[in-house]
Image: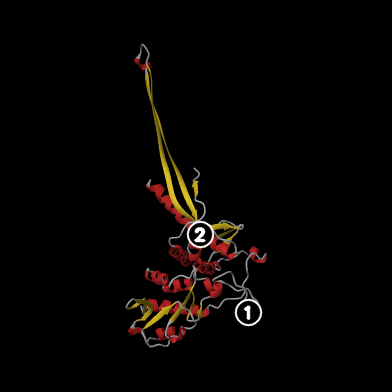
Amino acid sequence: MEGNRNEYNKVLANTNDEEVLLNLVRRRYADSIAVLEVNSVSTSLEWRKNIGISANFFDGDLDDNNLGLSGNGSYSEKPTITYLPLNGADYVKNVLSPISLDTILLLTRSGWAADRVLRLTVNKINGVNNASEASGPTPSSAPTYKGFRLLASQIKELQKMDSFALGYQLEGDFRQLGFLVKPDQRNTPKVKAFMKSINVTTPNNIIPITSDYSGDGGGTTIEINVRSLAGIQFFLSHGVIVPDEDLNKGRVQITKTADGKIFDWGNVLSDLFIVHSSKDKPKNAGVAVQYRGHWFYIKDNDMQSKYTLMLLNQISALQSGTVEKAGPVLTLPVSQ
């Protein structure tokens, strides 16, 4: 029982990662995605046993007599998995709605690095563009991203120095999310450089954070334009390295720079999320799926991509919430 439960656990975790990866690849190819949620796993156990006794007795010598004992047993397990397609109106609305600032705060407080969370979930901060053009179908022109890469590296350094905290400022019943700069860090060169990057000029140590996006924050607030779950999926899908065969046959949108050269999406995502491709099944894959005649996979030693996939799974669970399941319930017995 214990061994089988662990095996089911492994299979569910692996197939969930495979489904997420498959849908990211589909996004890159402009194909429709589908999500099947495992609603339940049940199993029936059956034991069978038989015992037989046979004997032969003869007159005369006792050595001619014999007694036989036979027995056999068998064990079988019949698992059944129930799937629910997620495609109802509530689910689609949640997927297309911007992620809340509360979710971003929750993720940063749960141990995720602030720079990873922001690079994944944010389009712009005070006008600094995080490849917002990639939050939908693949653009034909190269995105703007270098300023945000600098901003993310600054946030990473400030977090290491414990220079700031994210939290809520309470005024009566009003609750305002804020960016608190530690007073003893306010005038350090790195904090000053960060404030300059996001165009914040206020001397206050608590800077309000809002998703009411108007532009550059006016020097007194931090305005964040947040991605939806679908936007995050589209963004990460550009980390899929498409086989040359499919590029040459026009099966994906090709992004080009201003001078007409093919844009390398690795410039945006190489240290965050990369999906490799090969004709043959990879031997060093942490997660792999087969699609359109090729294998797409995350290398088992690519910790950054694996962490990002883990974070995407958590965001998906938070954003999906409790929604009405739509479509037929698919109950499938597992082949023996």
Quadrant in which the N terminus is drawn: top left
Q: Residue at x 55, y 60 (%)?
A: 33
Does label 1 or label 2 sit earlier along the sequence? 2
The Cα–Cα distance between marks 1 and 2, rounded to whole angstroms, is: 41 Å
Between 111 and 126, the residue placed more toward the observer is 126
Name the secondary structure under disc 2: loop
Residue 77: image location, x then y, percent: 43, 42
Q: Are marks 1 and 2 in contact (CB under 8 Å)?
A: no
Does residue 285 show up?
Answer: no
Q: Residue furthest right?
A: 249
Q: Is residue 317 above or below residue 142?
A: above
Local crowd at mark 1 within 10 Å, few (<14), some, or many (≥20)? few
Identified by mark 2, the residue type is Gly
Residue 181 in the figure: left or right of residue 307: left
Local crowd at mark 2 within 10 Å, few (<14), some, or many (≥20)? few
Q: How many marks?
A: 2
Between 157 and 236, the residue placed more toward the observer is 236
Residue 265: image location, x then y, percent: 56, 72
Between 237 and 306, the residue placed more toward the observer is 237
Residue 40: image location, x then y, percent: 44, 51
Residue 88 in the figure: left or right of residue 167: right
Specify the label residue 88 is tagged with: 2
Name the secondary structure under disc 1: loop
Q: Quadrant of residue 220?
A: bottom left
Residue that badge 1 annotates:
258
Q: Residue at x 59, y 62 (%)?
A: 31
Specify how the rendered protein is coloured: secondary structure
Identified by mark 1, the residue type is Ala
Q: Is residue 318 above or below residue 42?
A: below
